[in-house]
Structure formats: structure tokens, C-alpha cells
Image: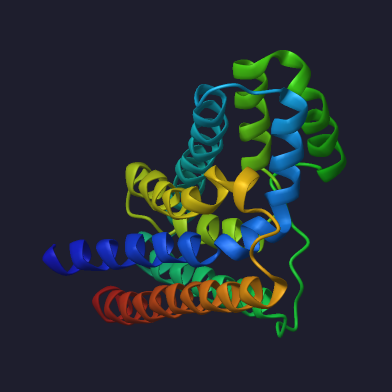
Amino acid sequence: MEHSHHLAELSYGLAFMTGLLGSGHCLGMCGGLVSSFFIRLGARGVTPYLAYHGARITVYAVIGLIAAGLGAVLVQTGEFGRWQGVLQIVAGLAVILLGLDLLGVSPVRNSLGFAPVAWLRRQFGQAFSKGPRLGAAIGGAINGLMPCSMTMAMAVKATTSPSLAEGGLLMLAFGAGTLPAMFSASFLFGRLGPELRGWLLKGAALFVIALGISTLWQGLRYFSVMNRLLG
């Protein structure tokens, strides 16, 4: 039990560091989007910013809950012990590939998102017209669904969480790591040069790969133990 607790803490830490070091990537991919959104929104005060990023991270947590639920369904379709190990092995390999994709060296490029990109962009472009608070919340929620290899990697990892709550917490840890850059995107965008953003992205990719290796190792170990127990 204590061993599992330490592994969970390690996963949360890696997820947080992925979000934190991925700040340069966030600014590069979403900084201009967020900046222009708030310029068009005409936001005054801190409330719209809190609504935006609160909704964005809430979406991450919901994705984590759904992913953990999906993982639970998958492992209950057969022999629980073996399938739990198989799921962790597959998820670990997928997370490693997504980390390599962030480094630009993966043999498989990620083209998956949580919703159709054209629809997301259309809804995002219309959200500012809903008012400073509601519009910001809608924009943040849509931002949370935007295609991103880092977010996808965390969601895949969440499928191996032992409970729905832990899947949600994993995504919350990742979201918390992205807050410093994303919350101040309007002020920092353009101040981080492409070279610095590139180094930060490489750091985030290494944490993603470390998370994948950890998941893969847990899966191999778990599968081996359960295989011996179940014969």
C-alpha cells in the first residue's frame, strides 16, 4: 500500500513538472491565442482570468476522471490482474511515444484530440461574445480540449490510475503546472524566445518519457506477478 502511495506521488510530481516545463510549449502554441482572446474579451480585473483557467483545469480533471473510468472498464473485461498489467504496459509505451513526439523524433506523429479541431476553433472564436465571465469560462473549457501531445500523454497515463479520483488528481497536477505560464500568457507571450521555448519543451518531453517508462515498468512488474499468481 505504501509502495503504491509513493508511486502515485511520483506520478503527480512528474505530471506537475511536465506542465511546468511545458510552459514554453504552452506559450508557443496557445500564448497568442489566449492573448488575442482576452484582448477581444475586453476583460477587466482578475475574475475573467480565474474563470478561464479554472474552467481549463476543470476540463483536464474531467478528462482524467473519464480516462480512469475507461481504464477501469478495460481491465474488467477479462482477467483483472493480467489486464491491469497489460493496460499499464500499453499506456506506458503510448506515453513514451507522445514524449518522443514532443521531441520531434517519434516514428508516430500524434494527430489525436479530444474533439474536432474545426469545431473547437469555431466555438473558441465565438466565446468572447458571451461576456467577460461566461465567455472566459467557455474559452478556457475549449482551450482544455485543444489538441496537445502533453495533455494526451497525461490522459493516457490517467487510464492506469487505480481510482477515478486519482485519475482526476493526476490531470489536476498537470494543469497546476501549466498555470504560471498560461495565467500570465497575456503578459509573457513573445518575451520567451523560440530557443528558450524549445529547451523548455525538451525538458517537458523528458518528464513525459520518464512518466511513460515508470508506467511501463509498473505494468511489466504487475503483469509478471499476476501471471505467476493466476498461472
What is the count of numbered marks?
0
Of 227 and 195, which appears nearest the observer? 195
Residue at x 56%, y 37% (from the top left corner): 56
- Counting from the top left corner in percent of width and height, residue 112 is at 74, 57
Find residue 187 and report its horizontal and vertical position in percent: 61, 47
Applied colour scheme: rainbow
Q: Is residue 143 left or right of residue 70?
A: right
Where the C terminus falls, by quadrant? Answer: bottom left
Q: Which of 85 and 105 is in front in this view?
A: 105
Query: In the image shown, does 60 or 81 lie closer to the viewer?
Result: 60
Is 147 left or right of 56, judged from the image as shown?
right
What residue do we see at 71% from left, 41% from top? 35
Q: Residue furthest left?
A: 2
Q: Nearer the viewer, residue 108 or 127?
A: 127
Hey, which quadrant is residue 138 in on the image?
top right
> Residue 230 occupies which quadrant of the picture?
bottom left
Q: In this view, does 127 lie above or below 8?
A: above
Outermost residue toward the top in this view: 131
The picture places residue 9, in percent across and down from the top left corner, at 26, 62
Q: Position of residue 20 (x, y in %)?
A: 46, 61
Left/right of residue 208 with respect to residue 121 in the rendered view: left
Location of the N terminus (image quadrant): bottom left
Q: Which residue is drawn at 68% across and 75% down?
A: 101
Instruction: State the residue at coordinates (82%, 31%).
Output: 125
